[in-house]
Structures are given as C-alpha cells and as structure tokens.
Amino acid sequence: MLFTGRNIILTGASGDLGTAITRRLITQGANVLAVGSDAAGLLRLAAEVSGPGVLETFVADVSDAAQVLDYATHAFELWGQVDGFVNMAGIQTRVRPIVEFPEEDFDRVMAVNIRGVFLGMKYVLPRMREGGSVVNMSSALGLVGGAGIVAYVASKHAIIGMTKTAALEQGPRKIRVNAAAPGPIAGSMTFKLADEVFSGSKKTFADTVPLGRHGTPEDVAGLVSFLLSDDSSYATGTTHSVDGGFTTA
C-alpha cells in the first residue's frame, strides 16, 4: 500500500501500459485520474480495474492546451492536491525512411509525444504538492536510433531533455522528475511496429534483446511505481531503462 491517500494523474491510460500501471497504482492504494482520448477504452479500464484506491476517468486530447488544463484542474478540484503524475500518452505512425516520411505523420507525433508531455508538465506542476513525483514516458528509442521511425525516436529523445530541464526547475520544490525508457513491451503498439519492421520474416523484437523476450506491461508498471514512491526519493533528472538489455549493445 505504497500510495494510500496519494493522488496521481496518468495520461495515455487506456493502452496496454496505461492499464497495467493504473491497476498497479490502484492496488497500491492510490487515487488515480486516468486520462485518455479513447472514451470507450477508458470505460473498459474502469470495468477492469478495482482496488483500495479510487479510479476516475477523463477524456482529453493531450495535444490541446485547453483540454490539458481541464484535466489538471479537474484533478485539483477532486483532491485539493496532486502527488504524482505519469505523463505517458504517446503514438507511433507508419514506418518510412526520412526522405519518404509523411510530414503530417511527423507533425502528429510531435503534437502528442512532445507537446502533450510539455503541456502536461506546464499545467500539472503548479497543482502538484511539494515533494511530488513526475514520471515522463520516454523509450529505449529515446536513447538510441531507429531506422524508419524518425518522429517517434526524435520525440522520445526530446522527452529525456524535457525531463532533465523540469528536474532542475522543480528541485527547489523537492518535486522529482524522472523518465522511464521501456524497450520492446508486449502489446499492440510493439506488435504493429514489428509487423512493419520485420515484414515477411519470423523475427521479432524479442530476438534483439539480451534477455530474449518481450517485456510485459507489468515490468513497466513496477518501475513507474518505484519512481513515484518514496523509495526513489533521491532520484531526479534521470532516465531508467526497462528494456531487457536492448540498449546495452
């Protein structure tokens, strides 16, 4: 029960990772405002997750400043303070080399993955209590390159830079800001990407990982729980990989 009485906002809540992280936090006693753009997905989440903590849902497009302000304000009105923020909403588009990469795909990824993370911190941090914790969701591809996915790779590198900046700025308030960097995690986004990258082959991303398997959403949930908790009270401005060794080569 690490988070009894603590209030946490989580964006990108209806995806595979969002569901696992929400379940972990609710089970550990947190009150969670689960934010996502997929209303039906949030309904499914609410039906699947239960525990000592209380789950609330909020439909919002994280790339829209007014809607981000709305979810941040709603959380503050619900609880009076925010203790944690999992800034996770992100997308991936078609696999194409840079010279063929559609400009509209690039712009959409930037809008969600970078602007969404920026706006989340802009509007949640002022409503966060002193000593709170932010976890921005980067990726193993925020630490290395990846052919054919320039927008996603660029956005995940940018999140690490924003994390370091926010950690410096929020230090005086004792708010910790860290990034999680998952590798190939079993789920719809990873499998869809693998279909394009390894088209016509039996190879999977698990074949590129020293541990020889895909990660699970629960692997990421464990890391996020640690970074939100007091067990990581002296960690800030850092990026924590959960990638089975993917970035060690």
Image (cartoon, rainbow, N blue to C red):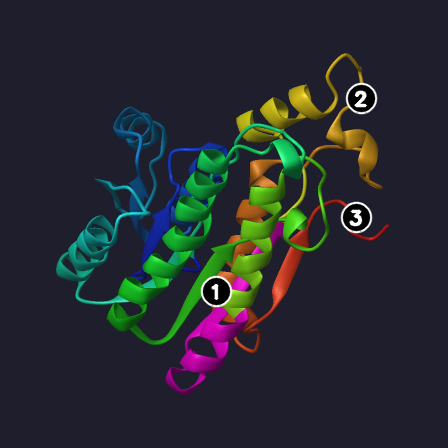
User: What's under tag 3, amino acid-wise?
Assistant: Gly
In this rendering, the answer to whether 105 lies above or below 53 is above
Residue located farthest toward the front when viewing the structure as drawn: 99
Q: Is residue 178 magenta?
A: yes
Q: Residue drawn 19% across and 52% down?
A: 66
In this rendering, the answer to whether 205 lies above or below 135 is above
Give the magenta part as a residue range: 164-181
* Front in this rendered view, residue 19 or 245: 245
Which disc number belongs to residue 229? Answer: 1
User: What's under tag 2, amino acid-wise?
Assistant: Lys
Q: Position of residue 61 (x, y in %)?
A: 28, 42
Badge 1 density bin: few <14, some 14–19, many ≥20, Cα 10 Å: some
Q: Is residue 55 left or right of residue 74?
A: right
First reached walking from the N terminus: tag 2 or tag 3: 2
First reached walking from the N terminus: tag 3 or tag 1: 1
First reached walking from the N terminus: tag 1 or tag 2: 2
Residue 185: in sight, yes or no? no
Q: Position of residue 116 (x, y in %)?
A: 37, 51
User: What's under tag 1, amino acid-wise?
Assistant: Ser
In this rendering, the answer to whether 234 lies above or below 127 is below
Mark in the foreground, 1 or 2? 2
Which disc number belongs to residue 245? Answer: 3
Q: Residue drawn 54% across and 59% down?
A: 158
Q: Position of residue 75 (x, y in %)?
A: 21, 56
Badge 3 density bin: few <14, some 14–19, many ≥20, Cα 10 Å: some
Q: Residue drawn 52% across and 58% down?
A: 159
Q: Using the numbered discs, state the Cα–Cα distance from disc 2 to disc 3 in whole angstroms.
A: 18 Å
Residue at the spot of label 2: 203
Q: Secondary structure at mark 2?
A: loop
